[in-house]
Amino acid sequence: MISIVAGGYNEKKYLHSFFTSIYKQTCPYLSEVIYVDNGSRDGSTGYIEQYFPQVRLVQMGANVGFCRQFNRGISEARGKYIFIVNVDMVLKDTYVESALLAMGKDPAIGRVSGKSFFMKEDGSFTDIIDSAGHSIDKMRWHKNIGDSQKDDGRFDKEGYIFGVCGALGFYKRELLEDIAIDGQYFDEIFFQTIEDVDLDWRSQLQGWKCYYTPKAVAYHIRKGSCWDKKKTFMYHNYK
C-alpha cells in the first residue's frame, strides 16, 4: 500500500540510522522500501546488500541527479502512496502512520508534509526547524515554512499549505500520475533543487491540495551530499 523510495549518492554514513528508523515505523501498511543509488563510490550499495537485504536496490550507474533518480524509483514502486525520503534523515516511529492519517482527511489531498528538524552530523537532534512544508508569496518566491526557526509552538497547527519539501514528500500515487509530463513526475530539466516546488505548482493547478501535520516528525541533516559541491548546488538552485 505504501512504497518508500529513498535515494542517495555517496551517503553510506547515513544508511544505518536512516534504514533503522524506516524499519521501526509503526504503520502496518508499508509494502516495500526501494533505494535508488546514483553511482556511489563509497560502498553504499554493498552496505545495503549486506545489512539491509530486504531493500530493493536500483542502481543508476552514474550521478543522474535527484529528478531522474527519483522518477526511476517512483516508476519501480507499486504502492498506492509513495513516500520519497532523502537518506540524511531519521524519522520518528510514527511518521508514516501520522502522514497517512492526514492524507485521509480529504480526498483532494495528494501531498502531506510533516515537521522536520535539523540534525547535526553526529546524529544529535535539535529543536530548530528544517521544514514544515512549503509556502509561496505574491512574488512567487517559495520557502520552507519555519526554516531555521526554533520550535516554539508556532508550527503546531495542522492545515492546508502550498507544498511539501521533496526531501520528505508523502504523495498519493494518483496525484503523481495526474501531474506527470511525458512520464516524468519530477521535471528532469531541474536535475536537482526546486524540482519539488515545480511539482507543487503542477499539483495545485490540477486541483490537488497539500496538508501539513506536525504529528509527523523527522530530523534532517540537509544537503548531506550537496554542500560538498556548493557551487554546483547553487547553480542548479538559482537556475
Image (spheres, rainbow, N blue to C red):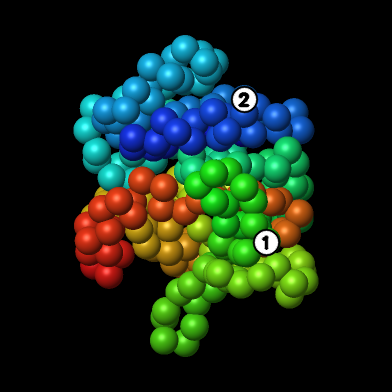
Compare residues 135 and 87 and report the one nearer the observer.
Answer: 87
Compare residues 105 and 148 and report the one nearer the observer.
Answer: 148
Compare residues 112 and 174 and report the one nearer the observer.
Answer: 112
Identify residue type, mark 2: Ser
Of label 2 and label 1, which has the lower sequence position? Answer: 2
Quarter of the image for residue 196 reads bottom left
Q: Which mark is residue 127?
A: 1
Judged from the image, the secondary structure of the residue bearing numbered disc 1 is strand
Residue to which mark 2 is pinned: 31
Mark 2 or 1: the one toward you: 1
Residue at the far bottom in the pictured view: 138
Q: Which residue is found at the position 48% from the left and 36% from the top?
A: 14
Q: Which residue is found at the position 76% from the left and 54% from the top?
A: 215
Please state the horizontal and vertical placement of residue 63, each as a whole percent of the image: 24, 38
How many angstroms separate mark 2 from mark 1 (CA)? 31 Å
Q: Which residue is found at the position 77% from the left and 71% from the top?
A: 153
Q: Quadrant of the N terminus?
A: top right
Judged from the image, the secondary structure of the residue bearing numbered disc 2 is strand
Q: Residues within 10 Å of mark 1 (few under 14, many from 20)?
A: some
Residue at the far front in the pictured view: 122
Please state the horizontal and vertical placement of residue 28, each as a whole percent of the image: 75, 28
Vertical placement of residue 175 versus 145, above or below: above
Please state the horizontal and vertical placement of residue 96, each as a whole percent of the image: 68, 41
Please state the horizontal and vertical placement of residue 158, each as a whole percent of the image: 74, 65
Res 166 visible: no
Label 2–label 1 contact, CB within 8 A:
no
